[in-house]
Image (cartoon, rainbow, N blue to C red):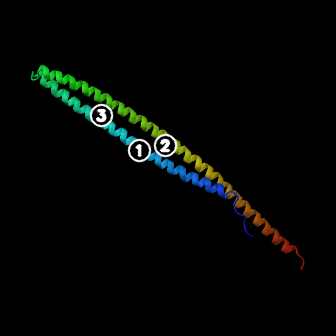
Amino acid sequence: MRRKAYPLDALAAVRKTRVDDATRGLGKALRTREATERAREAVEAERAREAALADQVRLTEARSLARGELSAADLQRQGAWEARMQWEAAERARRLEAAAEEEARARKSEREAQASVAKAEAEATVVRRHREGWVAEGRRTEEAAAEEQAAEAWRRPR
């Protein structure tokens, strides 16, 4: 006796495709989050390097001033330089904040992609379990039919 085709094969294929698509989406979200994390870390490292360099210049200038080696023009240039450093530090802080916000968006997108994969896998699992039950029921029906045929053959008078 030929078994019937599973009536939800098309749905199972769609659910499998959704799992595959969601998994690819998660991979993309992971790569994006990792890239934004690296970008934020690079901005933080640049900010730290620039701050350390500015502190070193300030220390050198303060020592020169203490020794009386600087003129009024040097002090004026130092004031302009300090204003520039403050502006650049504020700009780096804005870039760091923007990078952190971008990373937060990427993390949120990653969590959404993880949820999407979990949902797609759960939906595919429902169909897979239904199919397993359908197949098991078909086997039980076939076994019952075979037993009935065997019993019928045994009962026939000879």
Q: Are marks 1 and 2 in contact (CB under 8 Å)?
A: no
**Left or right of residue 71, residue 10 in this image:** right
- Answer above or below: position of 75 versus 28: above
* Quarter assignment of residue 133: bottom right
Name the secondary structure under disc 2: helix
Q: CA distance from mark 2 to mark 3?
A: 27 Å
Q: CA distance from mark 1 to mark 2?
A: 10 Å
Decide which of tag 1 and tag 2 comes sooner along the chain. 1
Local packing at callout 1 (Cα closer than 10 Å; few below 14, some 14-19, many 20+) is some
Pointer 2 residue: 110
Local packing at callout 3 (Cα closer than 10 Å; few below 14, some 14-19, many 20+) is many
**Left or right of residue 111, residue 88 in this image:** left
- Residue type beneath disc 2: Glu
Residue depicted at x 55% and y 44%: 115
Front residue (pair 80, 14): 80
* Quarter assignment of residue 104: top left
Quarter of the picture containing the N terminus is bottom right
- Residue type beneath disc 3: Arg
Pointer 3 residue: 47
Residue depicted at x 70% and y 63%: 5
Query: Looking at the rendered structure, which numbered label has been put on residue 34?
Result: 1
Decide which of tag 2 and tag 3 comes sooner along the chain. 3
Q: CA distance from mark 1 to mark 3?
A: 20 Å
Residue depicted at x 90% and y 77%: 157
